[in-house]
Image (cartoon, grey):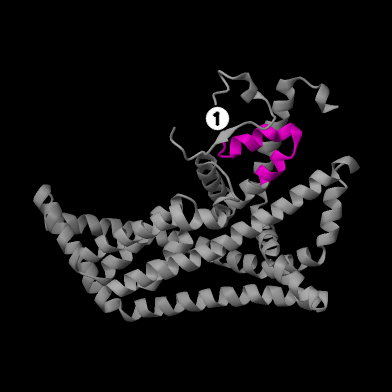
């Protein structure tokens, strides 16, 4: 019936549907985000679950052991960060002395290039410190609410994961019943490819965190940079957020280095090592792990990260790229939405659609990589 509608009406319905989805996610993010997170973790646990099932283990026990594996991994991360933070606390007197030294050096530099003397700078810092304290007091209640929300989020995850693995066949039957019998082979293919992309992407990210932590933390440790492992882990985790995370990771690495040294050469060293590790990651290691599976162009990767962050904060930023990748798989296999799949992908047409009419159609065309400059 919709095939008989004018093109403008079809596109208006698509845009309204997109707006409705975004509105639902904004309104129901506290419910939707744990479900989405549980869905992706469930997909990643499927190989473990299937392995245990092949060993004749009861279904319930196989699911529980799979969830315990994730819990053990999270517990190790929490232990590592608590241990590293404990080391920072022990070094607090030295950190305070280093920060004071850097502030004094910055103050001297400002005095040389501006008309502000030390007293004016101290008055300015005191005023801004009071403002920050007032802001912190007003946000304390909100922070408590956020913290309780995080505990609820984490508490719901195991329940959702268990139920999704236990009722996966019901969910699959529900999906197939949405489509005509003739379309079931395409639906099955899309499900398998979605599962493959999610697994390869998430497992690839775990591998990426591991080798970036070892490379970055190990090199910095050999050089003699304090808190090298903490810098490595923080950067590796933040690097999961496309494009934006690397910038934040660099800033945190610089701040941690400044607090542990009174000299500037460690800062330059940290930035140089991060740049070297990023070069290896972007050009050699990561393309071999997940680059061939998730082909999303940089424009919509960045937009996805910012939209995900505005909708659901940090969790939305982390989930943005796999969600966009899943949408691309669905769009590529749906005749009505193929153009959206093209828009999200990084396969540029080999020739301009303005000049060659063949490149304006929905059928497959010759492409070139989205990262080529020619």
On the picture, is 4 further left or further right than 374?
A: right
Residue at image mark 1: 350
Residue ID at (74%, 53%):
192
Q: In the displayed image of the protein, which residue is found farthest to the front?
A: 366
One can see residue 93 in this view: yes
Work out which quarter of the rendered image holds the N terminus and state it: top right
What is the magenta range?
A: 327-348
Residue ID at (69%, 39%):
332
- x, y percentage for residue 258? 26, 66
Mark 1: secondary structure? loop
- x, y percentage for residue 60? 80, 75
On the picture, is 274 further left or further right than 168?
A: left
One can see residue 240 in this view: no
Give the mark count.
Answer: 1
Residue ID at (82%, 74%):
59
The majority secondary structure of the magenta stretch comes to: helix
- x, y percentage for residue 120? 15, 54
Work out which quarter of the rendered image holds the C terminus and state it: top left
Neighbourhood count class around disc 1 (C-alpha, 10 Å): few under 14, some 14–19, many 20 upward: few
Residue ID at (79%, 22%):
5
On the picture, is 276 further left or further right than 168?
A: left
- Magenta region includes residue 236: no
């Amino acid at each position: 019936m919709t095939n008989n509608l004018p093109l403008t009406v079809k596109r208006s319905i698509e845009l309204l549907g997109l707006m409705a989805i975004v509105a639902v996610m904004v309104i129901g993010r506290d419910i939707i985000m744990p479900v989405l997170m549980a869905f992706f973790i469930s997909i990643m646990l499927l190989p473990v679950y299937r392995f245990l099932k092949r060993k004749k283990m009861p279904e319930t026990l196989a699911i529980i052991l799979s969830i315990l594996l994730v819990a053990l991994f999270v517990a190790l991360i929490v232990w590592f960060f608590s241990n590293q933070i404990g080391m920072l606390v022990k070094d607090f007197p030295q950190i305070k002395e280093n920060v004071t030294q850097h502030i004094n050096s910055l103050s001297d530099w400002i005095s040389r290039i501006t008309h502000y003397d030390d007293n004016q700078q101290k008055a300015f810092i005191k005023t801004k410190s009071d403002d920050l304290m007032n802001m912190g007091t007003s946000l304390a209640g909100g922070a408590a609410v956020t913290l309780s929300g995080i505990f609820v989020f984490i508490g719901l995850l195991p329940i959702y994961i268990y139920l999704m693995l236990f009722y996966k066949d019901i969910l699959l039957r529900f999906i197939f019943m949405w489509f005509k019998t003739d379309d079931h082979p395409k639906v099955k293919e899309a499900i398998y490819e979605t599962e493959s992309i999610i697994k390869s992407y998430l497992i690839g990210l775990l591998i990426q965190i591991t080798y970036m932590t070892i490379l970055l933390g190990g090199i910095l440790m050999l050089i003699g940079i304090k808190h090298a492992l903490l810098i490595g882990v923080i950067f590796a985790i933040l690097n999961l957020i496309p494009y934006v995370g690397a910038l934040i990771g660099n800033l945190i690495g610089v701040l941690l280095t400044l607090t542990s040294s009174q000299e500037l050469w460690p800062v330059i060293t940290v930035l140089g090592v991060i740049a070297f590790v990023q070069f290896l990651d972007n050009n050699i290691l990561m393309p071999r792990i997940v680059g061939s599976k998730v082909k999303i162009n940089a424009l919509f990767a960045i937009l996805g990260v910012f939209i995900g962050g505005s909708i659901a904060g940090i969790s939305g930023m982390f989930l943005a790229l796999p969600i966009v990748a899943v949408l691309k798989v669905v769009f590529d296999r749906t005749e009505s939405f193929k153009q959206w799949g093209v828009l999200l992908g990084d396969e540029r047409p080999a020739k301009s659609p303005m000049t060659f009419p063949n490149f304006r159609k929905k059928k497959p065309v010759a492409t070139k990589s989205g990262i080529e400059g020619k």
